[in-house]
Image (tube, helix red, strand yellow):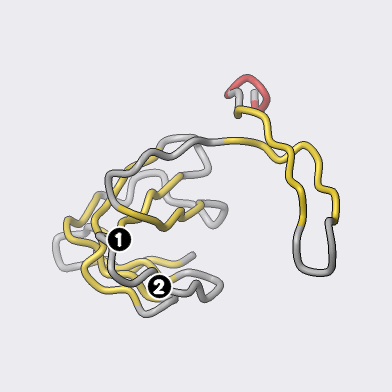
Amino acid sequence: MSYVINASGNVFNITLDTEVEPINGINNGVVHVRANGTQSSHRILFFDGQRIRIETSFAPNGLATDDLAIIGEFGSEMRRVIVSDMQPLDRLNWQITAVPEAPEIFQ
């Protein structure tokens, strides 16, 4: 992920490493999860699959190359989980077993 900084020194654009298909017809948002564990939510103004312009810029404190972007409906619930097992059902479908993420795992 890379960032574009405005004249005030804040992030206002995020560019993803991999293209994601935009979700049409909903109020899109991005949760920015920093490698240090902090996270913030931002309403998306423009999203073309790889470039995101957010509604409100944020300070670039703690940005790292290992940051994560989660894209979906703005204001919807997000549950952080760890995938503990994956079993193929057929060529294109998998059964995924996930457990709640525990911050202690990363300490």
In terms of secondary structure, where does tag 1 sit?
strand
User: Quadrant of the rendered structure where residue 65 is?
Assistant: bottom right
Q: Which residue is mark 1?
A: 28
Mark closest to the chain's N terminus, 2 or 1: 2
Give the left or right position of residue 72, taking residue 11 as reference.
right
Q: Foreground residue, 63 or 89? A: 89
Question: Would residue 102 be found to the left or right of residue 37 on screen?
Answer: right
List x then y, in percent, for residue 47: 32, 74
Amino acid type for the residue under numbered disc 1:
Asn
Name the residue: 21% across, 68% down.
45
Residue 64 is marked as none
Depth check, front residue: 87 or 14: 87
Q: Where residue 22 is drawn, which disc sits there?
A: 2
Q: CA distance from mark 2 to mark 1?
A: 9 Å
Q: Secondary structure at mark 2?
A: loop
Residue at 51% in and 51% down: 67
Asked if residue 5 is positioned above or below residue 80 in the image, the reply reads below
